[in-house]
Amino acid sequence: MGINKKEFVHKVDTGLKADNAYRKFFFRCIVEGKEYSKLFDYSDKGWDKRTRVSQAKTDAKSFRDKKINPVTEINENIKLDEFISEFFKYAPETTWKQTKINHYNNYIEPHLGKKKVQAIKQMHIKECIKKQEELGLKPRTIKTTLEVLNPVFKEAMVNRLIDFNPCDGITIKIPKTKKIVVGASEQLLEIFNAIQKVFEDDPFYQSLYFFALQGRRKSEILGLKWQNIDFDKGTYLIEDTKNGEHQMFVLPNYISELLKSFNSPIGYVYESRINKEEPISNIEKQTKKIKKILPNFTLHYMRNVVVSAMAEQGVSATLMSGALGHNNTNTLSKYLSLNYGKGSREAIKVIEKIIQKK
């Protein structure tokens, strides 16, 4: 069925138009005298208008770039450096993308970067891992090597560059180092009181640390945007998660009230006061204020505290994982988004039950 161009009445960008609902977008461009067009349909996505428009612009740019620099055939002698550069070029822009790029540049590229993709064998990857062990890197950091290379070699297989993924069969054992929190409920109350006391007249940072007490990671909090907070429904959406998926959580009333005292219609919730278009990047100075009361306090430790407090209250492991935003592949994937909501709701119940005793 042909595209009805008359349906697209709103100009979004050069060559890019949207339909009345801003759910479908039609893009047209001319490259070297030849016309190309593409339809982007986000009707089945649960995104708001701003997100759909932003994604359409990104997809349109990517479509045009591919027409300007078409990769019609991959050179069989292509080296890993070049291949992985193309791979990352089209990967979603997330914090974790940059982390993996940094890991590749620091620990993989010196050993494998100049090798042809077709020539890389399992023994080469194992030797690369051995070099990292000799540097004293922690197993979790070393495991990032597989998290970087595995999808890259899968991409190479899809493009018929290789027949076998050299990462298959390589495992890295991560020792169980989870901190055992004794008296988690009491510790949670101490942390809550400390945050409230230190930032009594500062809803900006008080809400930030209360989000951490809900189990949110630092990057998730600092990347939170106003457009992803729904005060009416009492929810908030985290887009930049560690496993790369969108996750919806319940917004506690006490955090909601703090946010309303300084909320803005656009931008990052915790925007930089130097550059309003970027979030703050360093909160160490504020964390030290809490450390004066609780010397062992860290942002990440709060994840251990809240999940341990939930365990003390008899909350199921599935909901505890949901509260922390873990993607457990052993659970039914179609229920994962529901578990995040249920898990965060159970975390809120536990936290409120504990703090109301003070």
Image (tube, rainbow, N blue to C red):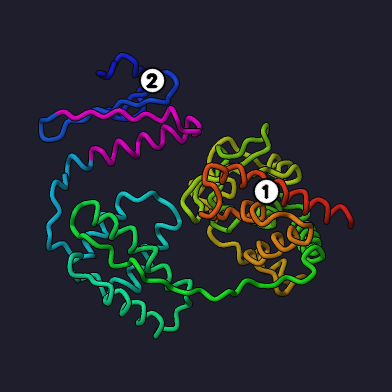
Asked if the magenta segment contains residue 179, the reply would be no
Q: Which residue is mark 1?
A: 344
Measure how far apart labels 1 and 2 are at the Cα level: 36 Å
Q: Report crowding for label 2: few under 14, some 14 to 19, many 20 or more residues within 10 A (C-alpha).
A: some
Element type at mark 2: loop
298 relative position to 138: left or right: right
Element type at mark 1: helix
Percent x, y of residue 35: 16, 28
Q: Nearer the viewer, residue 352 or 307?
A: 307
Question: Residue drawn 41% across and 30% down?
Answer: 42
Say what amino acid the circle numbered 1 marks.
Ser
Asked if the magenta segment contains residue 38, the reply would be yes
Q: Is residue 333 above or below residue 116?
A: above
Q: Is residue 272 visible?
A: no
Q: Which residue is mark 2?
A: 19
46 relative position to 183: left or right: left
Where the C terminus falls, by quadrant?
bottom right
Mark 1 or mark 2, whichever is nearer to me: 1
Question: Based on the displayed image, in which of its 4 quarters is residue 61 positioned?
Answer: top left
